[in-house]
């Protein structure tokens, strides 16, 4: 049908005017160099142009080497792809945050074989060696953000944002950082967990929401959403897979997705979302209540 969008080519506009692909490849859990190489090869072939990683994934170096070697195979260069990585602020108290941000960023650049990052996120609102209820969390992540702002102002990153931040954390940012607010908030988001107050807050401040765990934690063995009777009935109606239905549920609501897959068939299925859920189907899925995975980041002060 001509009116059905091809979400594989869709993008979302950030609040700095730049675009980010709506669908990307998550890489969490894939760290062996050969596995990363095969994943990148198959992902590029399937049409993925966004790759999401983190220092905590322990695969930045393998990802960087794979992209450097494989981009020419598909007649692509660095500017044709979008690389997201994350700053882990879970550090001991005796480390100066400015030095930590600087050193971590330089290591990520070297690992990824690039001289700039498209999107740099703070991994979590919490800090190692700091109790989750400690007020030090507030000052430490604020310090991290100020140093990330410097990287952005220097043109070394195209966009900066946060990950796993609740409304409470986001409000804190708006109150304390008036020059640059996060451009992306990457959070757990699926029909089984989608706090409406968070999406409304982000939308009101033009912050793009990007979903991790958008299949309900299938990569961690939580298969509840994929086996859900309603999801499977909707999938049959659209001649789609349950995973495609879950991903379309997010994308149709302007939520970016980064599903992780290693099998070529699943990679293709996850990016080929050439159907549209009805408003009623989205509403029905939005009423799922069971939270199936993830750390409760909302309790972090």
Image (cartoon, rainbow, N blue to C red):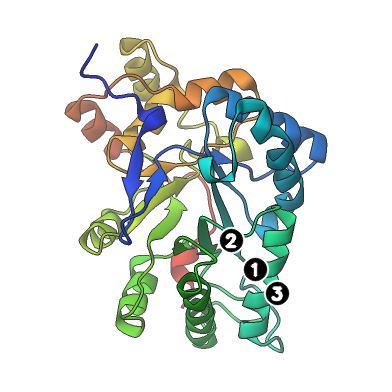
Q: Which mark is residue 86?
A: 2
- Find the distance from the CA under tag 2 to the CA under tag 1: 9 Å
- Find the distance from the CA under tag 3 to the CA under tag 1: 5 Å
Quadrant into which the N terminus falls? top left
The 10 Å Cα crowd at callout 3, few under 14, some 14 to 19, many 20 or more, is: few
Judged by depth in the image, the label closer to the viewer, 2 or 1, is 1
Give the mark nearest the N terminus, 2 or 3.
Answer: 2
Q: Residue at x 50, y 87 (%)?
A: 139
Q: Residue at x 56, y 63 (%)?
A: 123
The image position of residue 215, as x and y in percent, is 48, 35
Give the mark nearest the N terminus, 2 or 1.
Answer: 2
- The residue indicated by pointer 3 is 103
Q: Secondary structure at mark 1?
A: helix
Is 166 on the left or on the right of 47, as rendered?
left
Viewer-proximal residue, 165 or 256? 256
The image position of residue 73, as x and y in percent, is 67, 27
The 10 Å Cα crowd at callout 1, few under 14, some 14 to 19, many 20 or more, is: many
Asked whether the viewer can see residue 175, the reply is yes
Q: Residue at x 59, y 40 (%)?
A: 77
* Mark 2–mark 1 CB contact (< 8 Å): no
- The residue indicated by pointer 1 is 105
Q: Which mark is residue 201?
A: none
Q: Residue at x 76, y 34 (%)?
A: 35
């Amino acid at each position: 049908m001509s009116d059905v969008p091809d979400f594989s080519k869709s993008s979302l506009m950030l609040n700095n005017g730049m675009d980010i692909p709506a669908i990307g490849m998550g890489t969490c859990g894939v760290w062996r160099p050969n596995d990363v190489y095969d994943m990148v090869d198959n992902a590029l072939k399937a049409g993925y142009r966004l790759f999401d990683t983190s220092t905590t994934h322990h695969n930045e170096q393998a990802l960087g080497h794979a992209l450097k070697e494989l981009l020419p195979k598909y007649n692509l260069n660095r500017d044709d792809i979008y690389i997201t990585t994350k700053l882990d602020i879970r550090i001991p108290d005796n480390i100066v945050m400015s030095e930590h941000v600087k050193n971590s960023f330089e290591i990520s650049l070297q690992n990824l074989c690039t001289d700039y990052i498209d999107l740099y996120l703070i991994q979590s609102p919490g800090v190692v060696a700091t109790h989750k209820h400690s007020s030090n969390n507030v000052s430490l992540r604020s310090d991290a953000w100020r140093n990330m702002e410097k990287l952005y102002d220097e043109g070394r990153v195209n966009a900066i944002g946060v990950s796993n931040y609740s409304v409470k954390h986001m409000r804190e940012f708006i109150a304390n950082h008036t020059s640059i607010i996060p451009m992306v908030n990457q959070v757990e988001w699926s029909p089984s967990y989608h706090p409406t107050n968070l999406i409304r807050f982000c939308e009101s401040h033009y912050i793009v929401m990007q979903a991790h765990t958008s299949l309900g934690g299938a990569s961690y063995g939580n298969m509840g959403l994929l086996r859900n009777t309603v999801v499977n009935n909707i999938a049959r109606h659209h001649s789609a897979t349950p995973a495609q239905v879950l991903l379309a549920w997010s994308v149709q609501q302007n939520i970016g997705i980064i599903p992780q897959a290693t099998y070529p068939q699943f990679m293709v299925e996850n990016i080929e979302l050439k159907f549209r859920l009805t408003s009623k189907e989205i509403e029905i899925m939005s009423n799922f209540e069971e939270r199936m995975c993830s750390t409760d980041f909302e309790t972090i002060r």
